[in-house]
Image: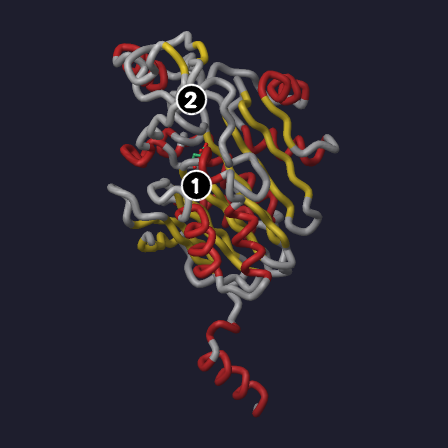
Amino acid sequence: MFVSLLVSALSVLCPLGQTSLPLVVNTWPFKNATAAAWRTLQSGGSVLDAVEMGCACCEMEQCDGSVGYGGSPDEYGETTLDAMIMNGNTMEVGAVADLRRIKNAIGVARAVMERTDHTLLVGESASVFAENMGFIAEDLTTNKSLNIFTQWLKGNCQPNYRKNVFPDPSMSCGPYKPKATLNQRKRVAQHANTRSHDTIGMVALDQNGHVAAGTSTNGLTHKVPGRVGDSPIVGAGAYADSSAGAATATGDGDVMMRFLPSYLAVELMRAGADPSAACKTAISRIKRHYSDFFGAIICANTTGHFGAACNKVPGFSQFHYMVSNSESDTPLMKSVDCI
Ligand code: SD4
């Protein structure tokens, strides 16, 4: 009696000690993805199953046009996919980048993890691997992505991500050749249209403290063919370690991958930072060098506490993300003010 009174008094006085596991957290208000992951956990699936199902749900739904087929056509008009999954118990990772013709990128990432000794497969060879593993090859182009591409061509291929080339990339389409002199070209204002990139990044934790993380995206619209973002890069797009927690990032991957924000956040949580503080520090680290980068990160520690942070830029002052835990039957949208 005395002990149980003491325990309940402590949980009121010290809510940080409470756990709320299992837990699913994902970037952006992709509610069906959260629900799919949560259902997977509830029906006895592992955290890896949950992350895979959650991300696959977004791939099928083409969440915001930024995940899965039919989005972010590159300079050739082709949609290519990046994805990763990480097992925080074993530190195994499977990832694919620049994946062509296969819709279920997170599934292929998991196959890389479970059916090879490798971590990351890229491009055409990743697609051949996927086909051999039984994934169906399909055209990822849709009327929508074709239209985005056609409009871009009509608009003189603007914006594009070339610099130090001729003809002048701010006024022309390629083919480009290198210019003899290197000049700074102001980075294309990525945050002019923050909706143009909304990767799903998801972390899942079970009751036993097993942590997993994953991502899936079609990257960046009008990217240079072959471009790979942060999402399939370990420690950049996501990171999971069952002895510390998990994190996953979204935003301007070309910048963010230089700072391994997901790894940093997990290491900060390992050192005792609470998830919100860890996320803020990861964002601040990037901000120091790229004050106007577009990006956000979500973090969860092993006790089921979670947090998020984002960089404030014009048109993006709040970041929304989804959470499912035992406190609610349905996924809840959370918001954080950007710093
Ligand atoms: C990328 N980070 O390829 C991805 C895109 C993204 O929110 O996260 N959008 O750069």
Give the class, few, some or many, for how many residues have Cα within 10 Å of label 2's Cα (few <14, many ≥20): few
Residue at the limit of the structure toward the top, as seen here? 175
Q: Secondary structure at mark 1?
A: strand
Q: Residue at x 48, y 60 (%)?
A: 275
Residue at the limit of the structure toward the front, as seen here? 181
Q: Residue at x 53, y 41 (%)?
A: 236
List the residue tagged with mark 1: 250
Q: Note whether residue 99 is visible.
A: yes
List the residue tagged with mark 2: 182
Q: Residue at x 51, y 20 (%)?
A: 226
Mark 1, ligand 1, within 8 Å: the answer is yes
The amino acid marked with disc number 1 is Thr
Residues 172 and 105: in front is: 172
Q: Which of the two discs, 1 and 2, labels the residue nearer the N terminus?
A: 2
x and y percentages locating residue 199 in the rendered image: 43, 37
Q: Note whether residue 147 is visible.
A: no
Q: Measured along the vertical axis of the image, is residue 295 above or below residue 83?
A: below
Q: Which disc, if any, is residue 275? A: none
x and y percentages locating residue 334 in the rendered image: 36, 55
The amino acid marked with disc number 2 is Leu
